[in-house]
Structures are given as C-alpha cells and as structure tokens.
Amino acid sequence: MTESPRPGRHDARFALALLGAFLLVFAVLAVNPETREDWLLENALVVAALAWLIPSYRRLPLSNLACGLLFVFGVLHEIGAHYQYSNVPYDRWFAAISGGHSRDALFGFERNQYDRLVHFLYGLLITPVSAEVISARVRLHGAWLFLLPVTFVMSHSLIYELIEWFAASLFGGELGQAYLGTQGDIWDAQKDMALATLGSLIAQPLWMWHRTRR
C-alpha cells in the first residue's frame, strides 16, 4: 500500500509551544500529588509516549490539530494523576462556578466520574491522531478508513486495562486499588473500554469529514 499525504497543516513552532506548555503543566502537577506512587504509575506511559513522539516528529510531523488534541488529553490525564482519578474534585469546582450546585447530584451520580470522562475523551481525542498517523503511512479506502483507526484505539484501550490489572496484581494493596480506580464497580474495565469505543465512533466520522474538506 502506498503512502497518502499527511492530513492537516503542521507547524513545528506550534508543536514545540504545546510541548513546552505540557511540560510546565506536568511539572506543576508533579508537586505534592495525592499519592506519589500512584502518580508515578500513571505517568509511566506518559514518559513512554513522549519518548516515542518527540524523536518521531521530524520524520512524521503531526498536524496542529493532532498536537492540540494530544495536549488537551495530556493535561486532563495529568489532572487525574495529580488528584488520583477517583478523587478529582470536579464536583467542588462545578459548585464553585454554579452557585453551590452539585453536578453529581444533578445527574444522579454516586461515584466520581472523572475517569469515565477521560476514557471517553481518549476515544474522542486520540482517534483523529491515530487516524492521521495510520493514513500517513498507508492509503486506506472505504470501510478500512473508518474501521482501522477505531479498532486501533479499541485495542489500545484493552491493552491499557490489562496493564492496569497487571500493575494492580503486582503491587496490590491500596496502591493497586488506587491505580485501578474501580470504586467498587466490578464492570469498571468494560465500561471504560465501551466509553473509549463510543468516543472513537463519534470522532472518526468527524475526522473523515474534516479530511474531505481540506
């Protein structure tokens, strides 16, 4: 299969600015996290991702859109790593800007939903990045243009859940439970993967539409 043109405009200065901004956020949220051990576990994959993305940018530069999506997701993940995903005080933040109203009470939530939100946004934000990387390497047509990026993200979501399970089994105790963040839901992993898939199914048609309008 032949390579297709890279989708979208890319600007190395924009990518560098976002990298600098992310590293600043990373450094700020690395100060006094809820649990240092959990923070280290949550950021192991971040370090691995940066170790791949930064050297590969020269030969496969990402579009400004892809860089922006990665930045937004990275910041959201760092917030979760700092507070611990199951303890992110989004409800307190919502109350502060809404006159004391509780978002969880409004929607009838009985658990902290931040981890579910980020899993959904993983599918929504990372699918276009995956689609861009894949389409830059191989020419895809028809159903493959839709299915391959979606299944790529689905497989990543599955692998992440397996990593969580392995880490929780390895470390055990409070650290293992904190990293899993199930909050007592035995179907937590399945729901996380389903939300990532839903986000991906929403994102890929939008990316394909955006691609045809360039």
Image (cartoon, helix red, strand yellow):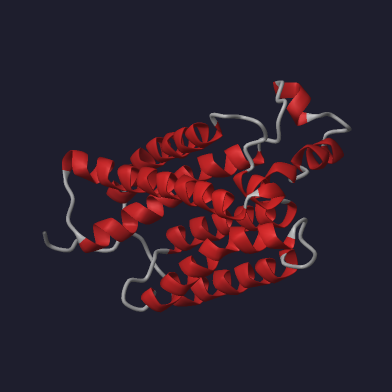
Front residue of this view, candidates 15 and 80: 80
Q: Quadrant of the N terminus?
A: bottom left
Q: Quadrant of residue 7?
A: bottom left
Up/down of 83 relative to 189, above or below: below
Q: Quadrant of residue 73?
A: bottom right
- Provide residue 42's location: percent of width, then percent of height: 60, 58
Up/down of 48 relative to 90, above or below: below
Q: Is residue 9 visible?
A: yes
- Provide residue 171's location: percent of width, then percent of height: 61, 55
Query: In this image, 165 relative to 96: left or right?
Result: left
Front residue of this view, candidates 188 and 58: 188
Q: Quadrant of the C terminus?
A: bottom left
- Provide residue 196's location: percent of width, then percent of height: 46, 39
Query: In this image, 135 relative to 166: left or right?
Result: left
Front residue of this view, candidates 176 and 157: 176
Q: Is residue 7 visible?
A: no
Q: Residue furthest right?
A: 100
> Which residue sits at x=68%, y=71%?
24
Front residue of this view, candidates 54 and 214: 54
> Which residue sits at x=18%, y=50%?
140
Query: In this image, 30 relative to 8: left or right?
Result: right
Query: In this image, 44 relative to 51: left or right?
Result: right
- Provide residue 50's location: percent of width, then percent of height: 49, 70
> Which residue sits at x=31%, y=43%?
151
Q: How many marks?
A: 0
